[in-house]
Image (tube, grey):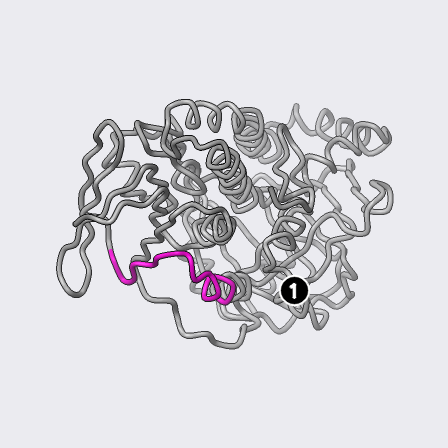
């Protein structure tokens, strides 16, 4: 007999795990399909990727019970400094000015993954298929049948709602026939940690140039996360630099606001592409996170946007279940798409527009950019609105981001 679930989540990355945790006490029957077994829990290394979490995300993770596991590794962001190389305008965002103690926090990606995994291990009501891969699906009037490949062979389960949280190359998206719009930014992102001469003390930098954006993020132990984008034709040469050469390149691109850079960690490189699903839903199916939209990392919007996808969906599913409704109904999917529209479209437009404007080498734009930043910096209402959106409060805000379990 085929097991029938209310909700099946494909993908146990950061977004998929967050959704499953949010549904643990919902009363819904939930399955989580994980392509690979959880990695060995290693101690965080200073050279790992780091995530800038918006305030809405840190509050949501607190609501989910995950945040207490991160307090030892999370570093608050209290101020943000935005500028462009060679231009005089700056925009400064300050938590105190916004009336909060922090605008968000920087967390090692590995630490967040481990914290989510530890919480997920306590979710005894979630049925986990691990390792298992989605091979095929068939949609009928009241369910979706899924063929899963496991080490013991093929198995079939059914679900009222199928959630694709399986990343940029989403199998769920492909099998449901949802197309994508893709932009290759012809940039490669280098990520590492390093030691700035001047302690950042909660200050994050976002800096733009003709060759792409870069960021410096505060970490524990006076270290900083460094994010550098370079034109892809230059990526091989940058990757080949030794530590001294890379530090010199980083210093030349960033400048001296944080003093001299030293002690770089191991670097990793990531090509930057924007892959946006042409729709969020198909019959009895919905996309969240990178399966729905993979965007330029400028402004650190990607995971924050995906988490808001997951928690908005969780909230709607819980409301629908309490009313005795069908988790995969067209009405629920339409409500979800409408609820996410303003936040998603606004974030997509902001991310792409910022790349096009802030990194455009046209000299005529230089004074306009500088004057724009100065104007925004000098108007409390304008800076406050930017800070609020940067903290993840755009459009309909999930209850989890307000500290409330639905």
Choose top left, top right, bottom left or bottom right for residue 89: top right
Residue placed at 43% from the left, 62% from the top? 124
| Left or right: 186 in relation to 94 | left
Magenta segment includes 123: yes
Residue 8, position in %: x, y? 34, 46
- Is 210 situated left or right of 56 in this image? left
Q: Is residue 302 visible?
A: yes
Q: What is the span of residues highlighted in magenta in the rendered image?
A: 118-132
In the picture, measured across the screen, residue 134 lies left or right of residue 67, that is: left
Seen at 41% across and 36% down, the residue is 292
Q: Is residue 121 above or below residue 340?
A: below
For the question of whether residue 212 can be seen, the reply is no
- Looking at the image, residue 325 lies above or below residue 198: above
Q: Nearer the viewer, residue 104 or 222?
A: 104
Helix, strand or loop at label 1? It is helix
The structure residue drawn at horizontal position 39% and vertical position 55%, both measured from the top left corner, is 12
Whether 394 is among the magenta residues is no
Total marks shown come to 1
Q: Residue at x 41, y 74 (%)?
A: 40
Instruction: Tell me: residue 180, above or below residue 148.
Output: above
The residue where tag 1 is placed is 68
The answer to whether 246 appears left or right of 291 in the picture is right
- Percent position of residue 137, x then y: 20, 39
**Residue 142 screen position, x and y as percent:** 27, 30
Tell me the quadrant of the picture where the C terminus can be found: top right
Along the line of sight, which residue is nearer the eye, 220 or 357? Answer: 220
Rate crowding at label 1 as few (under 14), some (14 to 19) or many (20 or more) other CA atoms within 10 Å.
Answer: few
Instruction: Identify the residue at the far bottom of this view.
Output: 43
Q: Position of residue 331 (x, y in %)?
A: 42, 22
Does residue 236 lie above or below 300 as drawn? below
Quarter of the image holding residue 260? bottom right
């Amino acid at each position: 007999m085929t097991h029938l679930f209310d909700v099946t989540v494909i993908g146990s990355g950061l977004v998929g795990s967050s959704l499953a945790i949010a549904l643990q006490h919902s009363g819904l029957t939930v399955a989580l399909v994980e392509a690979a077994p959880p990695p060995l829990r290693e101690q965080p290394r200073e050279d790992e990727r780091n995530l800038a979490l918006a305030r809405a995300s840190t509050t949501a993770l607190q609501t989910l019970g995950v945040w207490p596991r991160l307090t030892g590794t999370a570093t608050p962001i209290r101020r943000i400094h935005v500028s462009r190389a060679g231009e005089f305008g700056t925009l400064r965002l300050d938590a105190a000015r916004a009336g909060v103690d922090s605008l968000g926090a920087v967390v090692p990606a590995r630490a967040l993954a481990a914290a989510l995994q530890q919480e997920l291990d306590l979710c005894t009501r979630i049925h986990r298929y691990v390792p298992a891969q989605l091979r095929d699906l068939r949609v009928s009037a009241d369910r979706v049948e899924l063929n899963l490949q496991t080490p013991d062979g093929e198995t079939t389960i059914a679900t009222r709602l199928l959630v694709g949280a399986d990343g940029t190359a989403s199998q769920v998206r492909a099998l449901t026939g949802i197309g994508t719009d893709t932009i290759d930014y012809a940039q490669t992102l280098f990520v590492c940690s390093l030691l700035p001469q001047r302690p950042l003390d909660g200050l994050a930098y976002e800096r733009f140039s003709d060759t792409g954006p870069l960021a410096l993020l505060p970490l524990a132990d006076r270290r900083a996360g460094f994010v550098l984008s370079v034109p892809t034709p230059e990526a091989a040469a940058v990757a080949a630099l030794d530590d001294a050469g890379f530090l010199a390149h980083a210093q030349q691109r960033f400048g001296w606001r944080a003093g001299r850079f030293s002690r770089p960690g191991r670097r990793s490189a990531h090509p930057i592409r924007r892959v946006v699903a042409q729709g969020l839903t198909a019959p009895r199916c919905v996309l969240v996170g990178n399966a729905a939209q993979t965007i330029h990392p400028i402004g650190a919007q990607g995971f924050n946007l995906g988490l808001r996808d997951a928690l908005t969906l969780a909230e709607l599913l819980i409301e629908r279940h309490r009313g005795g409704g069908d988790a995969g109904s067209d009405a629920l999917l339409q409500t979800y798409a409408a609820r996410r529209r303003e936040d998603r479209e606004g974030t997509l437009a902001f991310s792409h527009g910022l790349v096009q404007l802030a990194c455009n080498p046209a000299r005529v734009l230089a004074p306009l950019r500088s004057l724009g930043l100065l104007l925004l910096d000098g108007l409390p209402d304008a800076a406050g609105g930017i800070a609020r959106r940067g903290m993840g409060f755009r459009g309909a805000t999930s209850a989890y981001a307000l500290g409330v379990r639905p």
